[in-house]
Amino acid sequence: MIEVKNLNFAYQKERVLNNINFQLEEGKSLAIIGPSGCGKTTLLYLLAGLEQADQGEIKIKSKLISGIRENTGVILQDYGLFPWKTVYHNLALGLKIRGCAKKQIEKKVNLALKRLKISEFKNKYPAELSGGQKQRVAVGRSLVLAPDLLLMDEPFSALDALTREEMQNLILEIHSRDNFSFVLVTHDIAEAAFLGHKIAVIREGQIVNILSNPHFGQKNLREKEEFFELQKKLRKQMTLEYGGENQHEKREV
Ligand SMILES: Nc1ncnc2c1ncn2[C@@H]1O[C@H](COP(=O)(O)OP(=O)(O)OP(=O)(O)O)[C@@H](O)[C@H]1O
């Protein structure tokens, strides 16, 4: 689904991504985790076609990415909702732009609202919603377009712990039914362990490790020993790679 080879990127002269390589199979998910400023969002922007690589290539479904791709959905940190449109019209807009007939739009939007359990808010404006409700609308706005790839940048970071888990469950549930691939940028080890088939640890613009998560998709995973083991492994990996006790020391890249 995604093939990334020898990817390098700099903002002006500052090198932000350094020789990034990975593959993600169709229908699978990748969680990208790492400290603030390590280049996670930049990598997501490159995958979305919002920035262009200086060197290297990104292929999605065997096609080189050179700009925004129609079947990629993107959810950025600030939800990106239109404040002057109701929930219904926020979801409908993408379909309208794509020339979808009114009846079809109604059907698709109402179904998405139902699945995301936000039908009761359809005539409300984003400012009248809680953070969790806004996030559902943002997810709905992407999913209504039936993307084959969904890119999410810290989508749940502003939510309280329980609402965050609810949203993670929702993503898992929708993913198991619709079978799209997704890439999720997160700071949260538990979130990466719950939502990533693969978990890429990034530091200072480099992937330092990619872990596989054989337990992905188990709804009650949070209650299982394997979940804690995976987080322990991931934390250890991150701590080791960040230099353990010397984590404040900068490592040469
Ligand atoms: N538009 C820009 N122009 C110049 N430098 C930028 C720009 N955007 C990001 N950077 C720099 O690139 C580096 C990586 O930023 P990026 O946002 O990708 O990191 P991140 O890992 O997503 O961080 P966070 O977890 O805090 O969101 C940082 O040093 C940042 O200051």
Image (spheres, grey):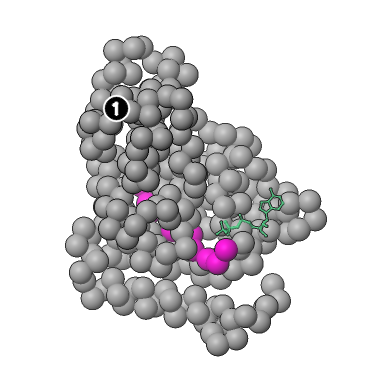
Residue at x 50%, y 79% (from the top left corner):
239
Residue at x 61%, y 63% (from the top left corner):
38
Residue nearer the viewer, 144 or 91: 91
Residue at x 44%, y 80% (from the top left corner):
236
The residue beneath circle 1 is: 122
Lateral position of residue 166 relative to residue 143, left or right: left
User: How many numbered discs, if any?
Assistant: 1
Vertically, is 163 above or below 105? below
- Residue 133 x/y as whole percent: 32, 41
Lateral position of residue 27 relative to residue 223, left or right: right
| Highlighted range, magenta | 27-36
* Badge 1 residue CB within 8 Å of ligand 1: no
Q: Does the magenta stretch include residue 219?
A: no
Residue at x 59%, y 68% (from the top left corner):
203
Furthest-front residue in view? 128
- Picture quadrant of residue 5: bottom right
- Picture quadrant of residue 244: bottom right
Which quadrant contains ligand 1?
A: bottom right
Which structural element holds mark 1? loop
Q: What residue type is labelled 1?
A: Lys
Residue 27 is at least partly visible in this image? yes
Residue 26 is at least partly visible in this image? no
Lateral position of residue 214 relative to residue 198, left or right: left
Q: Is residue 29 magenta?
A: yes
Vertically, is 139 above or below 244? above
Residue nearer the viewer, 242 or 156: 156
Mark 1, residues whose alpha carbon is within 10 Å: few (<14), some, or many (≥20)?
Answer: some
